[in-house]
Image (cartoon, coloured by chain):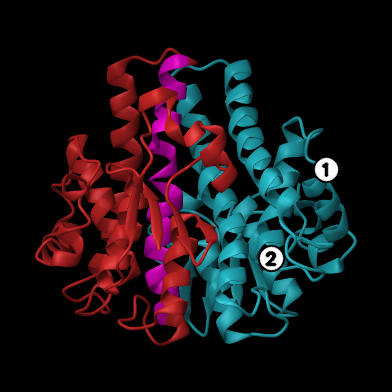
Chain colours: A red, B cyan
Amino acid sequence: MQLYTYFRSSASYRVRIALNLKGLSYESVPVHLLKHGGEQLSPDYRKLNPEALVPALVDDGMVLTQSMAIIEYLEETHPAPPLLPATPIDRAYVRAIAQAIACDIHPINNLRVLRYLVRELKVSEDDKNAWYRHWCQLGLAAIEATLARDPRVGKFCFGDTPMLADCLLVPQLFNAQRLNCDLSQMPTIMRINAACLQLDAFLNAAPDQQPDAE
Amino acid sequence: MQLYTYFRSSASYRVRIALNLKGLSYESVPVHLLKHGGEQLSPDYRKLNPEALVPALVDDGMVLTQSMAIIEYLEETHPAPPLLPATPIDRAYVRAIAQAIACDIHPINNLRVLRYLVRELKVSEDDKNAWYRHWCQLGLAAIEATLARDPRVGKFCFGDTPMLADCLLVPQLFNAQRLNCDLSQMPTIMRINAACLQLDAFLNAAPDQQPDAE
């Protein structure tokens, strides 16, 4: 498998964690989101992925896009260890936490959106950072409220083994900390993040461990 | 089942289509996103869904949130008719189209984001509408490019029966048309949308058919 990835891309980071948790080896193909006017926008990369976003995974010559769809594919093709629980209601709980990050936090703070704010709407650096922290803190606070009351939470978001939701949580926390979000009211999230960062699967997926890290 | 819904909510619309396609009856519980300062922000609704977003589905007393997680749950608990294809690679294709809408178009144009642009960043009405059309057209153009070249496309996004991707596409098109997005270069998407709108499952899920429609 080849993973088209950028070391700092949060969506790529999720897939790297999932691949590592499942013990799958892969080749990293770096796509630099800033250099050369954005390599993801090149005609060659668009041929692979018309969305012009990372990650993309190539498995047996077939191209997969969208981090959540890729992880569900890995789950179906390599079921052990599972990244989703056994029952539909528990799977829905894990998927909902993952989607809350994938839909309601990350895209609003993506590189291209922040650029639009600055370049098209002439938003100041301070207002751009306030925007980032607003959506990140709002979204994480809702997840904290969900996790804090749910008896299914264990060492990780669901029980005592890392699953899909944890694959999304750790990259989002990495970004939140990089942008100085206020995480002081999020003890459950911080505890789960710390537990994940004890594991090689998470550590080896981190931005600074990637071949294209700067 | 009870669906907490708002007639114009795109994410609720998706779930209504999925419920209809599966022939499942449900009770609509309206949550007005504009009245009373936003009913989704009320303490009672937050108890149900700390994210303070619609939809939420209650099944057998259990609360499910996030439209994509809800539809995957319906697929697992009521497999017929299927909303995902049989093989992992085809499922990944259908999920990727759905996620491209759920992650990369819809959240950036959500009501709360548009409000932040206007209230916090003092963006003009024209610039707000340009923002809306920019993300909608960019995202749909990428999906059009994907669909236009994929041999799996049939009458619908995958083959000749409506699936998960179609449940997402129709509500996004409804919004795109309401906001006067330029869809002239998207013949595949428009053809699929028209095919969906021949079916009762889609027609009955439309905003103007809901009990809380205005």
Q: Residue reaching furthest right?
A: B198
Task: Give the class, few, some or many, for how many residues have Cα within 10 Å of label 2's Cα (few <14, many ≥20).
Answer: many
Q: Is A99 part of what is drawn in magenta?
A: yes
- The answer, for residue B42, to whether it is visible in the render is no
Q: Chain of mark 2?
A: B
| Quadrant (top left/top right/bottom left/bottom right) for the N terminus of chain A | bottom left
- Quadrant for residue A75, please give it: bottom left
* Distance from Cα at disc 2 to Cα at disc 1: 25 Å
Specify whether residue A182 is painted magenta: no
C-beta proximity under 8 Å, tags 2 and 1 = no
Q: Is residue A141 above or below residue A69?
A: above
Query: What percent of the width, then of the height, locates residue A90?
Result: 39, 80
Magenta span covers which residues?
Answer: A90-119
Task: Identify the image quadrant of residue A50.
Answer: top right
Majority SS type along the magenta span = helix
Q: Residue at x 22, y 48 (%)?
A: A210
What residue sits right under mark 1 in the picture?
B187
- Residue A47 visible here: yes
Which disc, if any, is residue B6?
none
Name the secondary structure under disc 1.
Answer: helix
Q: Work out whether mark 2 precedes mark 1 in sequence or the reverse, and give the earlier one.
A: 2
Amino acid of disc 2: Arg
Q: Position of residue A98 (x, y in %)?
A: 38, 61
- Mark identifier at residue B16: 2
Disc 1: CA contacts within 10 A as few (<14), some (14-19) or many (>=20) = few
Q: Position of residue A36 (x, y in %)?
A: 40, 24
